[in-house]
Image (tube, rainbow, N blue to C red):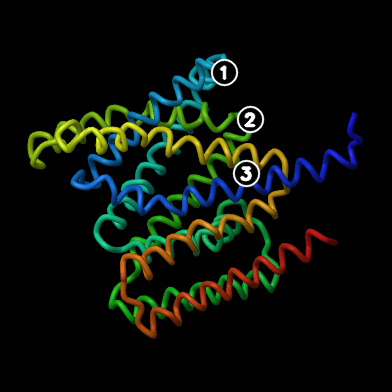
Amino acid sequence: MASSDESRPSASRVGVMLAVAAYLLWGVLPGYFLALAPANAFEVVAARILWSLIFCAVLLTVMHAWGAFWAVMRSRRARWTFALAGALIYVNWQTYVLATLTGHIVEGALGYFINPLVTILLGVFVLHERLRPVQWGAVGIGAAAVVVLTVEVGQLPWISLILAFSFGVYGLIKNRVGRNVDAVTGLTVETLWLTPVAVAILAIVQVFGGGLTFGTAGWGHAVLMMSLGVVTAIPLLLFAGAARRVSLVTVGLTQYLAPILQFLFGVFVMGESMSVARWVGFSLVWLSLLIISVDVVRRSRH
């Protein structure tokens, strides 16, 4: 029987591998969404909601975990809180898929780069946390990056800000209320709330948007659309497994893998332009994230 000292490093290695796998999968999502053409962004997100719900229902059945689902549904507070979480994740998903399919992958990646800064601000204004000077400095550098990018484009980077704030508030809600709810149950409740929205969107696309592509663009396209549930749920399960095995510091540091891959894909595969001002703005964001990461690691060691 392995000792606790031997099992801890093994669990940590597994946890890191799970976290890396989760963020790698999230990092290649732009390529997956582009492969769903000719489906538009609204059909893609509606299909993602419905197939995620179906896949989660299968998982709950296989794992005999319907009890957790019904416990959430019986709690009025939990039920409506997950409804709010579902609304936020819908805004996040729809914005990101629209950005991907309209040639704004790099701006989408920026949203997930600045998400940790938004999380810090939410901690200050919502949870009344006190920041250390180093953290304020990092937030200030991030704000300067937004100013540079705003001047360069001529308007606020709305895609990035919507992604960062929607996911930041979503994470805050899940952290405060969903601590005792596993990832599959939470996603099931959220997508259940969004199902009427998804059905309405599909009806609108069918009637006013030129028709649905599912079933009309070949069997390969149909399989990709049906796999949206798996593509959505698997990274969440990997992430949940990682969070149980390694520290939040480790999980937090690996989160940058996803936007890095998205950024590289947007610039070097899709050929999105990067002006000098844009490079400066991104560099400032990366500097602020470096400062935060070094500070977190240093304090965790103490």
Q: Amino acid at mark 3?
A: Leu
Q: Secondary structure at mark 3?
A: helix
Residue closer to the observer: 87 or 211: 211
Across and down, in percent, residue 9 comes to: 81, 46
SS of the residue under disc 2: loop
Q: Which quarter shows the C terminus?
A: bottom right
Res. 180 mark: 2
**Looking at the picture, which amino acid does disc 2 mark?**
Asn
Q: Residues within 10 Å of mark 1 (few under 14, many from 20)?
A: few
Q: Residues within 10 Å of mark 2 (few under 14, many from 20)?
A: few
Q: Determine the image quadrant of residue 178.
A: top right
Residue shown at 52% from the left, 29% from the top: 184
Q: CA distance from mark 1 to mark 2?
A: 17 Å
Q: Which residue is mark 1?
A: 63
- Residue drawn 39% across the image and 31% down it: 52
Number of numbered markers:
3
Which residue is disc 3 drawn over?
18
Q: Is residue 9 left or right of residue 287?
A: right
Foreground label between 2 and 3: 3
User: Does residue 93 appear to the left or right of 202 in the view shown?
Assistant: right
Residue 296 image position (x, y, % from top left): 71, 63
Disc 1/disc 3 C-alpha distance (Å): 20 Å
Answer with the quarter of the image where residue 226 lies.
top left
Q: Nearer the viewer, residue 260 or 189?
A: 260
Q: Is residue 34 above or below residue 292?
A: above
Query: Which badge, 2 or 3, comes first in the chain's sequence?
Result: 3
Image x and y of residue 24, in percent: 52, 51
Q: Please state which amino acid type lies under the numbered disc 1.
A: Met
